Image: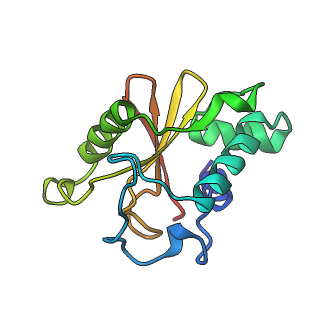
Amino acid sequence: MLITVFALVAMLGSHPDAPFGQPYRTDVPPTLAPCANLGAAGEEYLSTLRDIVSDTSDYGVEHRAAGELPLVADTNTVQIVTDAATCTRALAAARELLLPEAQASVTAVFVMRVGSTRFVVWNLRRRPGQSRLFDVFDANFRHIVGLTGW
């Protein structure tokens, strides 16, 4: 199970050259506050997530299980969220996972919706070696699982 989580994070961009491998970020301006726009990198993460949730091989099943993500037949239902109301809810949920002194420093989140049941959220302040990279939430923003590289 732990190896699966490592592999999932690797697939979602934990490579040192990817944005998740960059030093602690304080300069990420949200373009649709509180929704962060990661541009091409965000589109790449979306593509990878779509691959994971639509893969019916043993590999896909294993990776979805690690993130408690559903099998999705229509990958167009996996989208980057730009709706401020949804990002506000995701931001509040992501902040609750942080120590109180760190909560105010998170002002935007990168959110991907997986069908109607899951959200995959990155708070832009975490990096490999610092707790989780992504958090998976249900449709009501109850935390399901955090995914980390180690």
- Please give the name of the residue rendered at 40% of the width and 60% of the height, measured from the top-left corner: 124
Asked if residue 8 shows in the view, the reply is no
Q: Image quadrant of residue 102?
A: bottom left
Q: How is the image coloured?
A: rainbow
- Please give the name of the residue rendered at 56% of the width and 21% of the height, measured from the top-left corner: 116
User: Residue at the left extreme?
Assistant: 101
- Please give the name of the residue rendered at 38% of the width and 54% of the height, measured from the top-left corner: 123
- Please give the name of the residue rendered at 42% of the width and 52% of the height, measured from the top-left corner: 36
Q: Relative to residue 76, is residue 47 depicted above or below? A: below
User: Residue at the front extreme?
Assistant: 31
Residue closer to the observer: 61 or 16: 16
Q: Relative to residue 39, is residue 64 depicted above or below? A: above
Asked if residue 41 shows in the view, the reply is yes
Residue closer to the observer: 111 or 72: 111
Is 98 on the left-hand or right-hand side of 45? left
Is 3 on the left-hand or right-hand side of 55? left
Number of numbered discs overlaid on the protein picture: 0
Is 149 on the left-hand or right-hand side of 63? left
Q: Pinpoint residue 144: horizontal percent, then vertical percent.
A: 44, 34
Q: Pinpoint residue 31: horizontal percent, then vertical percent.
A: 40, 54
Q: Pinpoint residue 117: horizontal percent, then vertical percent.
A: 53, 23
Q: Relative to residue 84, is residue 28 depicted above or below? A: below
